[in-house]
Amino acid sequence: MIKLRGKSYQLYKRVPRRYAPIESRKFVWLSLHTDSQSIARSKADGAWAQMVEAWEARLAGDTADADKRLEAAKELAAVRGFRYLDAGKVADLPREELLRRIEAVSIRDGVPDRIDAAAVLGGAQGAGITVTRALEHYWTLAADKTLGKSEDQLRRWKNPRIKAIKNFVEVVGDKPIDQITADDMLDFRQWWLERIEGGLSTNAANKDLIHLGDVLKTVNRMKRLNLSLPVSGLSFKKGEARVRPPFSVDWIRDRLLAPGALDGLNDEARAIVLAMVNTGARPSELAALTPECIRLDANLPHISIEAVGRQLKTQNARRVIPLLGVSLEALRAFPGGFPRYRGSSAAL
């Protein structure tokens, strides 16, 4: 009801036909609490948009898919002005907040609307996120970890996490994550122990456990599931680090630099190998070099390892490396870098 120039008016809009199953009334009356025509129009549009949004969420709440129903309940709760909480947390709210939620549930023919009640009182329940479904959620929830990664780096970042989830599912099954027990995790650890005894490294096992735990903990935290996941204290003790033997000057000269020694490689791959000799740069770092990072005209020719179109492995990876000897000659042959491998160093 609005008042304009001393007269009272009712403001209403027709309910869209597709919402007929939800609202049996032909018209919706909006109380706007203002005597200003311009404010009334402004508030009418906002109120109408909010009601349409609520109807859309309620329609979505009729789906048989439990997870979609839960998401719809969260959206409808937000439209009503509340954050979705499960029923147990709603029951623990202060009395005034609890009453506000109860009063927000619409009543039809003397009966509380079940979809409204599920949204604002916490009655919606998801089907339970399985381990493989958790991985699907993880890609979105952990998007901040992929900022700055190239397409090739993103693929290599995803693969070990996919492998860890696949291994766990093969051993334990694709269980809902709220049903994963300590015994399940110990079974997975035992599966890896048998493979370590068969010759695989503890590093491979620990990576699986780390990636699995990261996926489950991220989904648990970001989805606010408040689960107690038994994923800690499972790693294997690392063995002694293997010492990498250095390449002797004689070996480099007589093997790598011998005439025809690298003829089996294409020109770009051969140049990258030679560029490694006096720089110590990683193959992926050399493959990713852009023309701007190869500075042959400087007083001291050098390359600059930078995060150009990719993410550096560590903070200390950003550095300037002087070019000498065969490494300098290799880069002089490719001053524009190595386009064949720039987008996919794994192919190298």
Image (cartoon, rainbow, N blue to C red):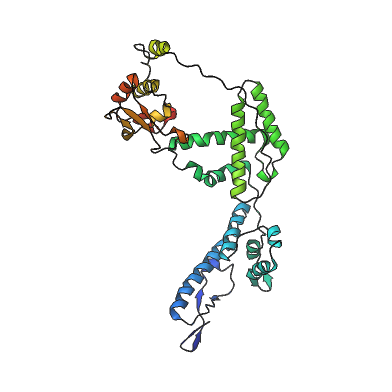
Question: Residue reaching furthest right?
Answer: 183
The front one of 244 and 229 is 244
| Residue 135 pos. (x, y %) | 57, 42
Picture layout, residue 40 above or below residue 218 = below
Tally the numbered discs: 0
Q: Is residue 341 left or right of residue 179?
A: left
Query: How far across and down, in percent of the image, does residue 265 sit?
Result: 37, 19
Residue nearest the viewer, comparing 126 with 339: 339
Q: Judge left or right: residue 283 versus residue 119.
A: left
Q: Quadrant of the C terminus?
A: top left
The x and y percentages for residue 139 are 53, 43
On screen, residue 76 above or below 183: below
Q: For this rendering, which residue is in front, 25 or 167?
A: 167
- Foreground: 21 or 156? 156
Q: On the image, which quarter does residue 73 sit in?
A: bottom right
Q: Position of residue 85 (x, y in %)?
A: 64, 58
Residue drawn 58% across the image and 49% down it: 222
Residue in the image at 46% along x and 33% along y: 316
Extreme-bottom residue of the structure: 6
Which residue extends farthest front?
Answer: 299
Task: Using the image, determine if residue 238 lies above or below residue 119.
Answer: above
**Res. 61 visible in picture:** no
Q: Is residue 285 visible?
A: yes
